[in-house]
Image: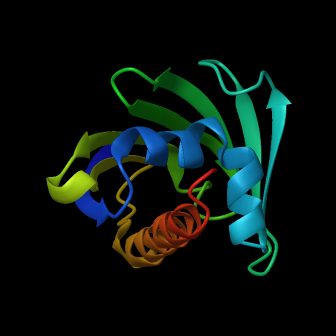
Amino acid sequence: MGIFTYEYEVITEIPPAKMFKACILDGENLIPKVVPDKSIDYIEGNGEPGSIKKITFEEANHYMVEKVEASDKDELVYSYSVIEGSVFMNKLEKITYETKLEPSSAGRSISKISYKYYTIGDFGITEGLKAGKEKALQILKVVDAYVLANPRH
């Protein structure tokens, strides 16, 4: 088994607490509204650690099942593991993600995102990494734009 770690940062326009609320605390409602080909359904729980949810990307005919590992609205940290899915899961034991939101200049947020891919054998993850990162960036930017346009959210 190998472990491949990838980290990056994204700056968004809205403050960290508001971005955490939009993406994490209200993500199962807001994200499918602004990203129409994506659905989020809880299988167990309602967002607290231990909850399990299924994310479906209808356009690409892919899905993943996530287990919430931690959700701290005071520290603005959220982590989960992908425990099942239609992409690469025969080559991966699991994937863990952690997002930490921090303040930036002028009321903006810095999203610090870390992925860990636990591979089975010598599988190289680089081919799917770019597509996954681009999809995550697209979702963050769409949520950011929506919350800016709808400040009461």
Residue 6 is at least partly visible in this image: no
How far from the left and from the top, in percent, is residue 29?
Answer: 76, 49
- Residue 86 falls in image quadrant: bottom right
Q: Would you say 73 lies left or right of 34 here?
A: left
How far from the left and from the top, in percent, is residue 35?
Answer: 70, 71
Which residue appears at 27% of the width and 63% of the height?
A: 11
Q: Report the number of numbered marks.
A: 0
The colour scheme used to paint the residues is rainbow
Along the line of sight, the residue nearer the viewer: 120 or 88 = 88
- Residue 96 falls in image quadrant: top left
- Which residue ends up furthest to the front in the rendered image? 152
Which residue appears at 34% of the width and 64% of the height?
A: 13
How far from the left and from the top, in percent, is residue 74?
Answer: 39, 20
Along the line of sight, the residue nearer the viewer: 109 or 130 = 109
Q: Would you say 144 lies left or right of 101 here?
A: right
Relative to residue 15, is residue 140 depicted above or below? Answer: below
Relative to residue 122, is residue 115 depicted above or below? Answer: above
Along the line of sight, the residue nearer the viewer: 16 or 72 = 16
Which residue appears at 43% of the width and 70% of the height?
A: 137
Residue 84 is at least partly visible in this image: yes
- Which residue ends up furthest to the left in the rendered image? 105
Q: Would you say 112 lies left or right of 121 here?
A: left
Along the line of sight, the residue nearer the viewer: 85 or 10 = 10
On the rendered image, what quadrant is the N terminus found in?
top left
Which residue appears at 64% of the width and 18% of the height?
A: 50
